[in-house]
Image: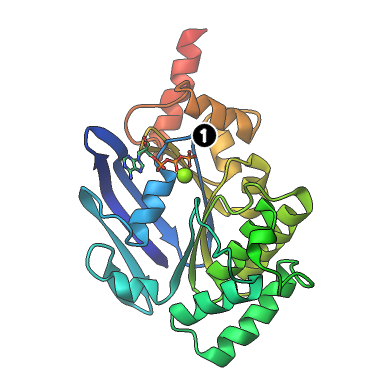
Amino acid sequence: MDIIEIENVTKKFKDNIALDNVSLRIRKGEVLGLLGPNGAGKTTLIRILIGLIKPTSGTAFVTYNGNKYDVKKDIMEIRKKASLLPQEAEVYENLTAKENILYYGRIFGTPNGEAKRRTEELIDMIGLRGRENDLTKEFSGGMKRKVLVARALVMDPDLIFLDEPTTGIDILGARTVRNLIKKLSKEMHKTIILTTHDLSEVSELCDRVGILVKGKLVALGTPDELEEKFQKAGFEDVFIGLATGEGVLEGDISTPKVKTNLISRILKKR
Ligand SMILES: Nc1ncnc2c1ncn2[C@@H]1O[C@H](COP(=O)(O)OP(=O)(O)OP(=O)(O)O)[C@@H](O)[C@H]1O
Ligand SMILES: [Mg+2]
């Protein structure tokens, strides 16, 4: 079942086309990775899906329990079960880690008792136990990022957008966050859309990956499927090929016909 249906979404900032006719369906319970070079449109797509900005044209719907909500009109309904870790989020520096997480839950309507219980749980899960009562202005960048990850999860969302969740976090911390994402997905059946520049993170976490280049969705599938489709030996080569324009095909690349076209093109070049 699809939880998100994106149809022909275009977003222009004046003359700059940040998203160019993007269509994509996201399945309930999957971890979908959005990959792409800087400025490809990843954050813009996420911001549209959670109602921070509106598409210039096209539509996107989120479905909860059989009810379909329009990102242009029904954003309050969508936000009841959706949460975002923004790429550029900041903690409230004059609050402790615990207060940051707890108050965020309260702002988004989580009942007090539940918010407290989840805050304690998240402090353990994210590895901040022992520092939870310290002011976050005393925290390192990565520690602040961990607080922000926990903050995004305190309301117990079904749909979670994580815009570069592990950027700036050290190797151990990144592992903690990745394990948390796995747990949310595999044990708690959450739908997770994440962006990252870390290709190993994609293969470790993502059921499918969508690659955006200059606002266009140029590929969608599992890393293995994309390797096969683009005749590359590894997923990194697929990404580099697409990001640099080599191997990007005109038209609908998700059809099997394209693969045949690609092979015939390669053969012609020989
Ligand atoms: N608020 C804005 N006003 C004007 N232009 C914007 C705005 N937000 C994004 N853009 C433009 O839209 C394009 C896509 O930006 P976006 O932030 O979605 O990229 P991204 O894929 O998330 O990149 P990164 O990997 O660097 O985070 C860029 O050209 C950017 O300059
Ligand atoms: Mg971004």
Examine the rendering and report whether any part of residue 224 can be seen. Answer: yes
Viewer-proximal residue among 122 and 160: 122
Is residue 222 toward the left or the right of residue 256 in the image? right
- The residue at 56%/41% (across/down) is 225
- Name the spot of residue 104 as percent of width and height, x first: 51, 74
Viewer-proximal residue among 69 and 84: 84
Mark 1 vs ligand 1: CB below 8 Å: no
Examine the rendering and report whether any part of residue 181 can be seen. Answer: no
Toward the front, the furthest residue is 94
Toward the bottom, the furthest residue is 113
Eyeballing the image, is 47 above or below 19? below
- The residue at 49%/82% (across/down) is 106
Name the residue beneath numbered marker 1.
229
Eyeballing the image, is 148 above or below 110? above
Q: Ligand 1 shows up in which quadrant of the image?
A: top left
Write down the quadrant of residue 80 in the picture.
bottom left
Question: What type is the residue that disc 1 sits on?
Answer: Lys
- Name the spot of residue 90 as percent of width and height, x first: 53, 58
- Name the spot of residue 102 as percent of width and height, x first: 57, 79
- Name the spot of residue 264 as percent of width and height, x first: 45, 19
Is residue 60 toward the left or the right of residue 114 in the image? left
- The residue at 60%/28% (across/down) is 237
Write down the quadrant of residue 14 in the picture.
top left
Eyeballing the image, is 195 above or below 269? below
